[in-house]
Amino acid sequence: MSHRRPVVAALVALALGLPFAAQAQQDYPARPVRLVVPFGPGTTTDIIARVFAEAMAKPLGQAIVVENRAGAGGNIGADLVAKSPADGYTIVMGTVGTHAINPGLYRKMPYDAQKDFAPIGFAGYTPTLLVVAANSPVKSLKDLQAAAQKQGGISFASAGNGTSGHLAGELLKARLGGEMVHVPYKEGGMALSDVMAGQAQFMFYHPAAVLPQVKAGKLRALGVSSAKRSGATPDVPTITEQGYGDFDLVAWFMLYAPAATPAPVLAKLRDAVAQAVTNPETKAKLAAQGLEVPLLKPEELAAFGRTELAKWSELVKRSGAQVD
């Protein structure tokens, strides 16, 4: 009899707690939601997060507070959310880095990119542009290939080891052949400046940063890294259509919640994302960042994540890049 009392007490407590949990999910959100950005203020991820924070606040009926938690290539902020209570009050603006590249790049990952998160919705994707200095003699991928195959080869810049720009450059190197030396920088702006100055021959970078320089006559765009042409640069051909095999690499952003977040809470968050991305004002702000935003079902988001993780993990392995 004495052994049964704790069991009965536990069952009673559980039964009493269930209505409160259900009510909490029904009332969600009853307070502001924290949106963690795993990179610093002013970064592309930060800008996109703030667009969504503003757009999602109205359908949710609560403020969304952006909190920057940078470090370890985004791992610190993502891990914070992975280990937060799964109640919908802490979410993260995940990226291709935090959820597809880093798992293969870092020897020790603090979280599982697939198992520790539930996808909420796409925040956008953008191809990167392959650019050279406007005064460079390289005017096409064939010219770039010829330069790489000459004695001494060429160099390409990136915003750092294991970044999407680095890995895109490694894939292009495999397709073109020849000698291409990777030159990693601490941040993309410095790399772009050296490409414009001719210190490095080319780099892959996101349209929002390079298009103003292309329009100003300082850079020339040779190709798009996605499978189809970008709406932001319809006149720039893809690398694939120029005859260099299947080349489809994009930088993407996705909102995630902790894995055990209740379905009713996820449904409200997903509805808020859907309303945000169909809002004309929000669409215009995202387009200004060179982003396209598909509206995918939860199972499609999960499948996309698995495919991207496998793709980028293979590229990281091929590049030999690794971070302790």
Image (cartoon, rainbow, N blue to C red):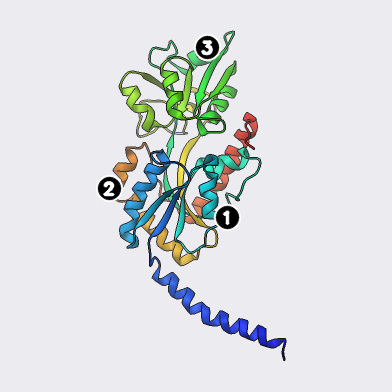
Which quadrant: the N terminus? bottom right
Type of the residue with mark 3: Ala
Q: Locate residue 185, reporting x and y percent.
A: 51, 26
Q: Quadrant of residue 64?
A: bottom left
Q: Locate residue 101, reporting x and y percent.
A: 56, 39
SS for callout 3: helix
- The residue singled out by tag 1 in the image is 116
Q: Is residue 136 shown above or below 104?
A: above
- The residue singled out by tag 3 in the image is 147
Q: Nearer the viewer, mark 1 or mark 3?
A: 1
For image coordinates 64% across by 86% down, the residue present is 8
Question: Quick check: 292 left or right of 200?
Answer: left
- The residue singled out by tag 2 in the image is 280
Question: Quick check: 129 left or right of 97?
Answer: left
SS for callout 1: loop
Q: Locate residue 16, reporting x and y percent.
A: 52, 82
How many numbered marks, from 0 up?
3
Type of the residue with mark 2: Pro
* First-in-chain label (3 vs 2): 3
Give the spatial CA distance, label 3 vs label 2: 45 Å
Q: Nearer the viewer, mark 2 or mark 1?
A: 1
